[in-house]
Amino acid sequence: MYLSKDIIMEGNPILRLKSTKVNLPLSSDDLNCAKGLYEYVIVSAVDELVEKYKIRPGVGIAAPQVGINKRMFAINCTDFLDENQKQYAYLFINPLITYKSKEMVYLPGGEGCLSVSRDTTNLVTPRHLKICIKSAILDFKTNKIKNVTMTLLGYPAIVFQHEYDHLDGILYTDKMFSIDEVGCEPLFTINENEE
């Protein structure tokens, strides 16, 4: 598993390179990278393990963030707007976005990134509400690759787009606007009176 010391921070030119396609079947190095990315997002969702390994929680991490400019990333997030709270835990390899909705949304609290340590409060990054994707995914039980198509809506779509940008050398900070000038609605609203 990758640790905080392995994550490349904003300002490092590696984060600005366009990543190359991953050759399939996976080489042992690419398989180790894939497993490390996936383990990070799974482990960082557990408070006790975050404390144990002294890592920052993250719902996604891309290979360029650990210095490997290959087109793969892992996500582990819950669609909290879905009544079933569907979980999205995947390692995507050579993903492609095939459709983007015209409707844009943003996270009212803004996005964060394991490679960005500066404060970006009151700034948001507009994202497509709905996307369709094609990708190879790695089944960690069998170490086999399968090709999938899926539609992502809301939060999982935002997380996917954030990580997808890393593969093209783009950080979320490149797309930030102040809330007053963003021109789209939040994905959800925050009730200030809730505790």
Image (tube, rainbow, N blue to C red):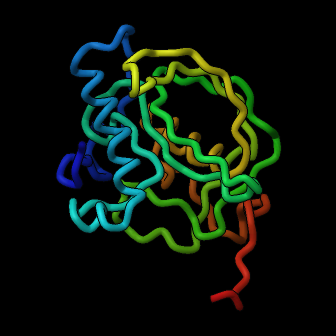
- Say how many tags the image has: 0
Compared to 194, does 174 lie above or below?
above
- The residue at 67%/54% (across/down) is 85
- Left or right: 54 with respect to 19? left
Quadrant of the image containing the C terminus:
bottom right
- The residue at 42%/28% (across/down) is 72
- Left or right: 136 with respect to 156? left
Q: Residue 193: x percent and y percent? A: 71, 91
Quadrant of the image containing the N terminus:
top left
Depth check, front residue: 18 or 74: 74
- Residue furthest to the left: 5
- The residue at 56%/47% (across/down) is 159
Compared to 21, does 118 lie above or below?
below
Q: Residue 21: x percent and y percent? A: 41, 16
Q: Residue 25: x percent and y percent? A: 36, 8
- The residue at 64%/62% (across/down) is 107
Location of residue 119 (image quadrant): bottom left
Compared to 141, does 123 lie above or below?
below
Compared to 106, does 148 lie above or below?
above
